[in-house]
Image: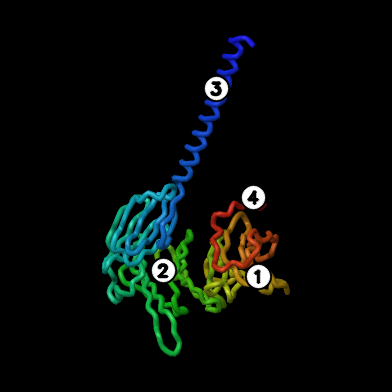
Amino acid sequence: MAIGERNMKISTRMLAVSLIFLFLILILCISYEYRSYEWEYRDASLVGVWNGKVAILKGDTLLILNITNGKVLKKFPNTKKVFLVENMLSIINASKVLNIDLRNFTITKLGVPKGVDSTELVFGINLGNFSLYSSSHPVRGKYNFEVIEYYICAENCLVYSFKAPPDSYPLIYKFSEGYILTFGTNDAFANGSAVVLSENGSFMWNLTTRYAISDFEYSNDTLFFSTGGTEPGGTLIAGGDIYAFSLNGSLKWHISFRNYEGKFYDWGIAGMKAYGNDLYVIGYTGTIYVIDFEGKLRRIIASPIYKRLETPSLIKVLRHQKMI
């Protein structure tokens, strides 16, 4: 073999080895890059996620993090309670009520309305046309229960009170026409209650459901409420209803997946999402039901998890296009 050919083969081999080496380095760099996005906080409570950021409460410190890499963007120590409504965080700090606008991190201080016990205050939020506060305290006796109160304050304060099972908590849904005030609970057989407010905070109507409210959707001038509750561990499950109301509070229709047209479909409803002219409903079996806005079952999508859900699941980010 000629020396030139031998040198060419050696050069080709060295080039191939170099390319493989560079390729491995590139893979390692990419791997490291992705690993650097993996992060976790132990012993912390999730408050909310929005626009690439996440809020968590660790001990008595509220942390605003970059969701990609976990980098701390803002830190708020001495936080007793924190509550999220859309882009506004309410912080109870000692006896102070602070609001943080998460779009620009503007901080404002709210006063505590007369007649509200600051030690029982869960949150206070300025919603523009009015301020909304909520307090909660347990009542212990022959029958234990939780008293959850909402204060709607403009010039004066109106109070709406809920009698809820022990360890229940305030729960707010926002829709384009106003607000839904209700409560969340782990009591599988609790009745649900809600107050519907307009955008300016005025009372529109209220409702009760035979099981606890698990989710809310608004579409086509219709308010949809689902019911479902499960005790810790998922031993007892109740619910399975969907109610459709017009904006004036009249009931359009009501169906139950425990007995829909004489058939059993599900124990309860964990969540739902309006898309097009249908509601996509997820049951506690994990099965997804597609119903139209008249309450007719159109389609059933088999469970992707093949087991009962022990806690309500959020399906607000389902890619519905892939289901149709």
Q: Residues within 10 Å of mark 2 (few under 14, many from 20)?
A: some
Q: Given contact means CB atoms under 8 Å apart, are the residues at marks 1 and 4 in contact?
A: no
- What is the secondary structure assignment of the residue under circle 2? loop
Determine the image quadrant of residue 95.
bottom left
Which residue carries the number 3 mark?
A: 15
Which residue is at a point 57% across and 59% down the rendered structure image? Answer: 273
Residue 187: x and y in percent read 52, 77
Q: Which mark is residue 202?
A: 2
Which residue is at a point 43% across and 50% down the rendered structure image? Answer: 67
Judging from the image, the colouring scheme is: rainbow
User: Which amino acid type corresponds to the residue marked 3 in the rendered image?
Assistant: Leu
Residue 29: x and y in percent read 47, 37
- Looking at this view, is 4 or 82 the one in front? 4
- What is the secondary structure assignment of the residue under circle 1? loop
Q: Residues within 10 Å of mark 4 (few under 14, many from 20)?
A: few
Which residue carries the number 1 mark?
A: 266
**Quadrant holding the N terminus:** top right
Mark closest to the chain's N terminus, 2 or 3: 3
Real-space Cα distance between discs 2 and 3? 76 Å
Residue 284: x and y in percent read 61, 67
Real-space Cα distance between discs 4 and 2? 40 Å
Real-space Cα distance between discs 1 and 4? 23 Å
In the depicted structure, whether residue 141 falls above or below residue 43: below
